[in-house]
Image (cartoon, helix red, strand yellow):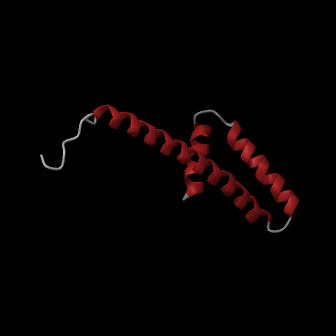
Amino acid sequence: MLWVGGSIIIHSLDGLGYHKPEHLIEAFAQSIEHAVMVFPRIINWLATSMVQACLGVIVGAAGIGCVSIWRRLSFRNSCPTTRPSAGQ
């Protein structure tokens, strides 16, 4: 599922008019395809999927980091400073 998320991001950027990431990935995949020269379509797909999976991991990690920082900041402000003891 990682490359699906990366693929969605790349195709969405392309749909918004930012074509460079998709062209860079295509150029990279074609260079790998020409370097290996065995099963070119499979190699192209694997290279494209690997780059998109890496992008999916990076964007996902950034999202997790942002949510974790947001939760820490929001819970810090909402938690009481004094906690009741166990006997109360």
As rendered, which of 79 and 62 lies closer to the eye?
A: 79
Q: Please, is residue 18 above or below residue 44 in the view? A: above
Indicate the quadrant where residue 11 lies.
Answer: top right
As rendered, which of 15 and 25 lies closer to the eye?
A: 25
Residue at the far left in the pictured view: 88
Q: Residue at x 19, y 45 (%)?
A: 85
Image coordinates for residue 13, horizontal then vertical, percent: 60, 38
Indicate the quadrant where residue 10 lies.
Answer: top right
Indicate the quadrant where residue 46 lies.
Answer: bottom right
Q: Is residue 71 visible?
A: yes
Left or right of 69 in this view: 59: right
Left or right of 62 in this view: 88: left
Q: Is residue 7 visible?
A: no
Image coordinates for residue 19, horizontal then vertical, percent: 67, 37
Q: Residue at x 44, y 42 (%)?
A: 68
Image coordinates for residue 69, horizontal then vertical, percent: 45, 38
